[in-house]
């Protein structure tokens, strides 16, 4: 081939090469592959803003390629690929946040379900414990053996014990009444009323009703006392609808019926004790009947506490109050079946409270106001038998103590409740001495017990 011909072929090849199209950048093929993947679809759904930005960069890269700006198309294509990667990362963050929100919701639902199961388990466990205790008590209970006849000295001792048990029964039923039905509709009969003039501890024939305790007549829903209502275990003159009247609430009917039955037993015991004292004949003291009456009232009080005790938490309000009074160092509180008891002496000069006595009662009023769930029983004990003529004076003393414990005297009590707190006075007479009634220290038997009735099981 001649040199000229070779030169012509070379020139033709150069011309053809100059007319060939510009090759498409490889990054645009990679970009198309990214757009077609599942990651891009997820980005479009969960991060639409970032996905739109990546698509905008892709459109600009294609426009640069059409302008034959291969370098610009390459740069914009790489930016579009990076934008798609950023959109995918944002979509993963959004998916993780959604999963976290769902997991938290499931966790909250699970925790609520677990709390419900734990509460139900606690309730069932408490019921099982109560049933086990009742079974144990029933299995270990011994039948009451009749006391039988005894010599005169023993009968005298039995009579004194029966009077004391009757008093304890009345005070226990009175405490139960404060928890179950602290007020009563006007005109309702007293559950354990006794003839007017009867006073606990009296042994005078014809008027004595041994073992009787009576509120000194505070009006329902008010701590101001009025006229005495012998034998009544709740404030006289209660008006319907007053605060804390629970006798008509559903679920209390069984408790009220149990308390009424126990109170009726006390009434029968009063009759038998009066007959024993006043007949002049050798009638055996009703010691067994008195024991059963006390047990019935204690059972009513226990049932009232069980009904009010939450099963989801351990009781301990009585322990807290006992610890608080003990820490004060001036009260010497004790606990008995009724609740926390503070005993005071020397409160009166005649029938009026002394200034020191009023100051002591104001301190207790603040304690009572700080623990409004505890009804308060004011029990007045005497150091000798009291005649019917002297009863109004003792009732006036009880009324004075009730007034001193009223919320009006509890200024400055932290956490005091505006609700009416039942405060009921009881005249106990001389049926529960703490020292020999015939000894030189018999004056110690004259005392006032301030009983904070424990509202829950001990």
Image: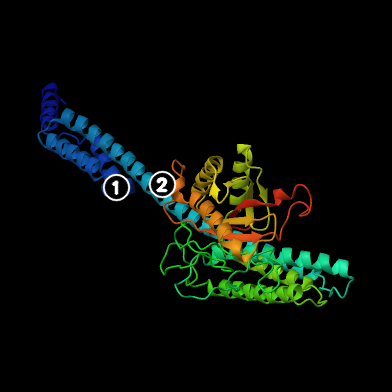
Q: Dot 2: within a 10 Å radius of its alpha carbon, few (fewer than 14), some, or many (20 or more) residues?
A: few
Q: Residue furthest top?
A: 3
Label 1: few (<14), some or many (≥20) within 10 Å? some
Asked if residue 157 shows in the view, the reply is yes
State the quadrant of the C terminus.
bottom right
Residue 298, given in percent of the width and then of the height, sits at 67, 65
Residue 132 x, y percent position in the rendering: 72, 65
Is residue 454 in view from this perspective? no
Residue in view at x 44 percent, y 61 percent: 221
Q: Residue at x 61, y 66 (%)?
A: 388
In terms of image quadrants, where is residue 13?
A: top left
Q: Is residue 124 above or below residue 148?
A: above
Quarter of the image that includes the N terminus: top left
Q: Nearer the viewer, residue 246 or 242?
A: 242
Foreground residue, 64 or 232?
Answer: 232
- Is 132 located above or below residue 2 in the figure? below
Q: Work out how far the residue at label 1 is from the one at label 2, CA to CA, in angstroms.
A: 15 Å
Q: Nearer the viewer, residue 325 or 313?
A: 325
Read off the residue under disc 2.
Answer: 100
Residue named by callout 1: 46
Q: Is residue 415 left or right of residue 323?
A: left
For residue 213, what is the image quadrant?
A: bottom right
x and y percentages locating residue 169 in the rendered image: 67, 66
Determine which quarter of the picture holds residue 135.
bottom right
């Amino acid at each position: 081939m001649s040199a000229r011909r070779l030169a012509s072929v070379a020139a033709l090849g150069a011309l053809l090469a100059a007319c060939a199209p510009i090759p498409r950048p490889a990054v645009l093929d990679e970009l198309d592959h990214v757009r077609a993947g599942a990651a891009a679809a997820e980005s479009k759904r969960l991060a639409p803003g970032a996905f739109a930005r990546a698509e905008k960069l892709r459109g600009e890269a294609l426009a640069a390629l059409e302008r034959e700006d291969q370098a610009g198309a390459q740069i914009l294509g790489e930016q579009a690929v990076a934008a798609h990667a950023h959109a995918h990362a944002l979509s993963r963050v959004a998916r993780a946040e959604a999963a976290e929100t769902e997991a938290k919701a499931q966790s909250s639902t699970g925790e609520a379900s677990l709390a419900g199961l734990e509460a139900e388990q606690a309730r069932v466990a408490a019921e099982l414990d109560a049933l086990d205790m009742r079974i144990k008590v029933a299995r270990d209970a011994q039948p009451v053996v009749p006391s039988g006849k005894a010599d005169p000295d023993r009968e005298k001792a039995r009579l004194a014990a029966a009077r004391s048990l009757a008093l304890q029964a009345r005070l226990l039923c009175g405490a139960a009444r404060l928890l179950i039905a602290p007020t009563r509709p006007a005109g309702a009969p007293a559950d354990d009323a006794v003839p007017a003039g009867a006073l606990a501890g009296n042994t005078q024939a014809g008027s004595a009703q041994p073992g009787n305790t009576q509120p000194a007549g505070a009006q329902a829903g008010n701590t101001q006392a009025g006229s005495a209502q012998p034998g009544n275990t709740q404030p006289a003159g209660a008006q319907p609808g007053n605060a804390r009247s629970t006798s008509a609430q559903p679920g209390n009917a069984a408790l009220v019926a149990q308390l009424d039955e126990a109170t009726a037993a006390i009434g029968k015991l009063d009759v038998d004790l009066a007959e024993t004292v006043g007949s002049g004949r050798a009638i055996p003291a009703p010691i067994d009947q008195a024991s059963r009456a006390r047990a019935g009232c204690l059972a009513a009080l226990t049932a009232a506490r069980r009904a009010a005790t939450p099963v989801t938490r351990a009781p301990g309000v009585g322990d807290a109050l006992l610890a608080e009074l003990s820490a004060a160092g001036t009260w010497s509180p004790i606990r008995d079946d009724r609740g926390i008891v503070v005993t005071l002496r020397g409160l009166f000069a005649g029938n009026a409270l002394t200034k020191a006595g009023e100051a002591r009662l104001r301190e207790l009023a603040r304690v009572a106001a700080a623990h409004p769930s505890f009804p308060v029983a004011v029990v007045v004990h005497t150091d000798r038998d009291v005649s019917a003529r002297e009863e109004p004076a003792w009732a006036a003393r009880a009324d004075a103590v009730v007034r001193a414990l009223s919320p009006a005297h509890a200024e400055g009590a932290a956490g005091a409740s505006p609700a009416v707190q039942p405060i009921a006075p009881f005249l106990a007479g001389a049926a529960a001495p703490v020292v020999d009634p015939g000894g030189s220290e018999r004056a110690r038997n004259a005392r006032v017990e301030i009983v904070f009735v424990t509202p829950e099981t001990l």
